[in-house]
Amino acid sequence: TKKILLNSRPEGRPGDSNFKFETEQVSEPKEGEVLLKTEYVSVDPYLRGRMSDAKSYIPPFEVGKPISSLMVAEVLESKSDKLQKGDHVVGMLDWKERQVASAEELRKVDEDKAPLSAYLGILGMTGLTAYLGLTEIGKPKKGETMVVSGAAGAVGSTVGQIGKILGLKVIGIAGTDEKVEMIKNEFGFDEGINYNTTDNMTEAINKACPDGIDVYFDNVGGEISEAILFNINKFSRTVVCGAISVYNETSLPKSISVQPFLIKKSSMMQGFVISDYSDRHSEGVQQLAKWLQEGKLTYTETVREGFENIPQAFLDLFDGKNKGKMVVKV
Ligand code: NDP
């Protein structure tokens, strides 16, 4: 079976040479284990962090060892009474076409309730991040104004829609005109700003948010987020969810000091990591599924095909080539 290893740690922007394809013999499942066939692979910006050896909230990948991410797989053979042949499961698995895994580490998903890929996005990690990040830290109140960066991505497009469900005015920031149109027309954002064609972001944000900003859901960090600070309201909240604009930086970026802005506005900025809220995951999934069923929430995906295209799909996240959740169908 084919597998993808971390070949070397990237310096700056990752590229093809950081990945290595190999083949291996698949072992037989032992008691409590299952043999899996990979169906969908989630590629996510946070994997960039695991390719480095810097200390973080999850351990780094090891050079020469398989890369792993959340995946949907089909059970081909089961030596566990928890799972049966033909079941579909989600789990943190290696980038391999086939593999043996412990049934304990897997969660069964129902293909009749939602398309399998949805368990990696809207009903998975990115949907939960949007819902729990916004409600736990953003603490939105009806009538408030929220800005979302990375607005056309998996997390961002969901945050914006939940904002609308909760009665907020929502402004999204994204990298192309097409994405700006999409977030307004398909996801119901009130306004959109293309950061690539806007010279003065502070001014553009000020214009789009005449009443200032009460909640900022930050997926990108860097200069885009700095422009937000000039427009925050008294007692505003910033959800620091992602910082993709700086993940490939090799030196510490020159940055303005945020403290004076926060002090002046008694504003709060708080980091968020989805794994800290695992006790609320099932409740979150239930809420997201309900909104989906009621037609209040929708989602889009960019689906790449083929095991060999997993690295490129990951690399393309840094060029904004995805709309909504990026997944690879194997
Ligand atoms: P996305 O689907 O949003 O994909 C990444 C997007 O980031 C691209 O489509 C691109 O859109 C944008 N982007 C890439 N480079 C830059 C840049 N230099 N400046 C601004 N935007 C850029 O990914 P996710 O929804 O999965 O994740 C969004 C963010 O949330 C990431 O930062 C991720 O690390 C974080 N995250 C955090 C979690 C947590 O628990 N804290 C959990 C899940 C995700 P565009 O064309 O608009 O530039």
Image (cartoon, rainbow, N blue to C red):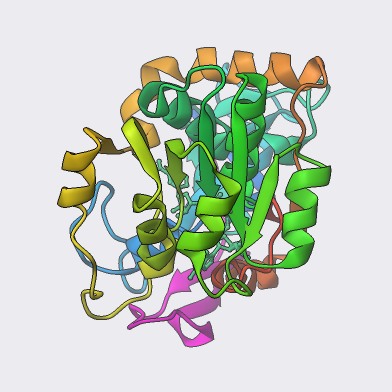
The structure residue drawn at horizontal position 57% and vertical position 67%, both measured from the top left corner, is 195
The C terminus lies in which quarter of the figure?
A: bottom right
The one of 74 and 237 positioned closer to us in this rendering: 237
> Does the segment drawn in magenta span residue 69?
no
What percent of the width, then of the height, locates residue 71? 59, 45
**Depicted 3 relative to depicted 81: above or below:** below
**Depicted 10 relative to depicted 243: above or below:** below
- Asked if residue 104 shows in the view, the reply is no
In-image side of 294 versus 26 (left or right): right
The structure residue drawn at horizontal position 68% and vertical position 69%, both measured from the top left corner, is 321
What percent of the width, then of the height, locates residue 270? 27, 37
**Depicted 295 relative to depicted 147: above or below:** above
- Asked if residue 239 shows in the view, the reply is yes
The structure residue drawn at horizontal position 50% and vertical position 47%, both measured from the top left corner, is 93
The one of 7 and 133 positioned closer to us in this rendering: 133
Magenta region: which residues?
1-30
The one of 238 and 314 positioned closer to us in this rendering: 238
What percent of the width, then of the height, locates residue 312? 62, 74
